[in-house]
Image: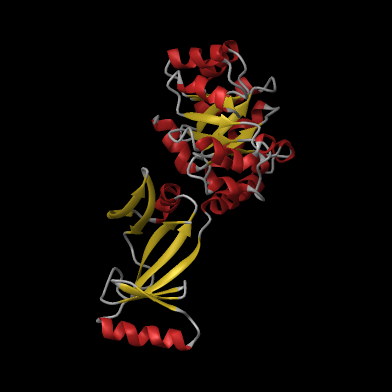
């Protein structure tokens, strides 16, 4: 997959921006970066779009700047000349797609049915915009399309906000999610940069879907593990014994011998393990590759390289 798309996957959200005043471009870009969303899809729906892209690209090298609503090759050329690193279109225009591919420019054409996907596959594409997402069947439709087209990824856009974000975020076939709720036009017009930054932070955290899965408790011997498990049984937790541990209900795993972590481990579930690792990287955490478990190329489980309060931590896909 293209390196740019991998960066977008790690960020997970693509703010879709309608900008009327090019003077707002740089402060808006700074607000996105500060909020943990260093990517912008500037839609070619206003006269200010071209200049906004040019200024963002020149002033904010850490920001991935793309152009949206690109409906023909002429607009694609304008966007690229202004500095756009990727092109997004609402539909599948073969002329626009071919223009981008001939110049090695990452392109996300809009699709919402098998025929359009097959047109893209015939050109070697593997990432598509799914648009308009909610009106085209939403997350269930993406699941249905990913069955026959298991190798492709989608960036759903249209009708998605904080209320239905999770439905898309947990799907393996979703590379990232496009939305405008964190960069609404009135917030930009009124120069509410701090509010935009706060909404971006909130959205990126919600995108992870972090929640407690279970607590692992290290014991020195199988006999000690059984004694500890029986205490949980007395509290009403049903026991399920395995080769290396005993589960007491869902929340507790009693290890039959010392495992990772000084005291044990904490399992945290998330929607996408790769994306969660990228989110945690600024906090100083890395994944321990030898602990990774994958399914169809996607991370399902991995331990982090640092303990929290004497407990190892591992991420598990929800």
Q: Is residue 184 visible?
A: yes
At 53% across and 42% down in the image, what residue appears? Answer: 37
* Residue 245 shown left or right of residue 41 in the figure: left
At 37% across and 56% down in the image, what residue appears? Answer: 301
Q: How is the image coloured?
A: secondary structure
Counting from the top left corner in percent of width and height, residue 129 is at: 56, 30
* Residue 175 shown left or right of residue 304 in the figure: right
At 50% across and 23% down in the image, what residue appears? Answer: 118
Give the camera-side residue of 185 and 57.
Answer: 185
At 25% across and 76% down in the image, what residue appears? Answer: 257
Query: What is the total number of numbered labels drawn onto the structure image?
Result: 0
Give the camera-side residue of 174 and 140.
Answer: 140
Q: Eyeballing the image, is 35 above or below 221? A: above
* Residue 93 shown left or right of residue 260 in the figure: right
* Residue 181 shown left or right of residue 262 in the figure: right
Q: Eyeballing the image, is 97 above or below 222? A: above
Give the camera-side residue of 218 and 287.
Answer: 218
Q: Eyeballing the image, is 17 above or below 271? A: above
Counting from the top left corner in percent of width and height, residue 119 is at: 51, 19
The N terminus lies in which quarter of the figure?
top left
Counting from the top left corner in percent of width and height, residue 127 is at: 48, 30
Q: Is residue 35 visible?
A: no
Counting from the top left corner in percent of width and height, residue 246 is at: 36, 76
């Amino acid at each position: 997959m293209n390196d740019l798309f991998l960066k977008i996957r790690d960020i997970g959200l693509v703010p879709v921006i309608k900008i009327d005043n090019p003077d707002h471009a740089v402060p808006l870009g700074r607000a996105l970066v500060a909020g943990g969303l260093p990517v912008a899809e500037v839609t070619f729906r206003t006269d200010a779009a071209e200049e906004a892209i040019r200024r963002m690209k020149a002033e904010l090298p850490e920001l991935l700047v793309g152009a949206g609503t690109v409906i023909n090759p002429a607009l694609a050329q304008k966007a690229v000349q202004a500095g756009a690193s990727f092109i997004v279109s609402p539909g599948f225009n073969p002329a626009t797609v071919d223009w981008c591919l001939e110049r090695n420019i990452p392109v996300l054409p809009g699709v919402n049915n098998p025929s359009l996907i097959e047109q893209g596959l015939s050109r070697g594409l593997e990432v598509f915009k799914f648009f308009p997402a909610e009106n085209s069947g939403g997350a269930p439709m993406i699941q249905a399309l990913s069955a026959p087209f298991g190798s492709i990824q989608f960036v759903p856009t249209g009708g998605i906000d904080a209320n239905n974000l999770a439905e898309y975020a947990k799907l393996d076939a979703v590379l990232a999610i496009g939305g405008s709720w964190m960069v609404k036009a009135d917030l930009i017009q009124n120069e509410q940069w701090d509010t935009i930054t706060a909404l971006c932070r909130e959205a990126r955290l919600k995108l992870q879907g972090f929640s407690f899965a279970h607590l692992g408790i290290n014991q020195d011997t199988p006999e000690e593990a059984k004694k500890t498990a029986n205490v949980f049984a007395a509290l009403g937790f049903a026991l399920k014994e395995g080769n290396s541990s005993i589960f007491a209900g869902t929340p507790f795993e009693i290890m039959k011998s010392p495992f990772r972590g000084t005291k044990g481990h904490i399992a945290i579930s998330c929607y996408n393990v790769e994306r969660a690792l990228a989110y945690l990287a600024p906090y100083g955490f890395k994944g321990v590759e030898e602990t990774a478990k994958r399914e169809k190329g996607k991370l399902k489980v991995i331990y982090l390289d640092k303990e929290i309060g004497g407990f190892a931590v591992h991420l598990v896909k929800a």
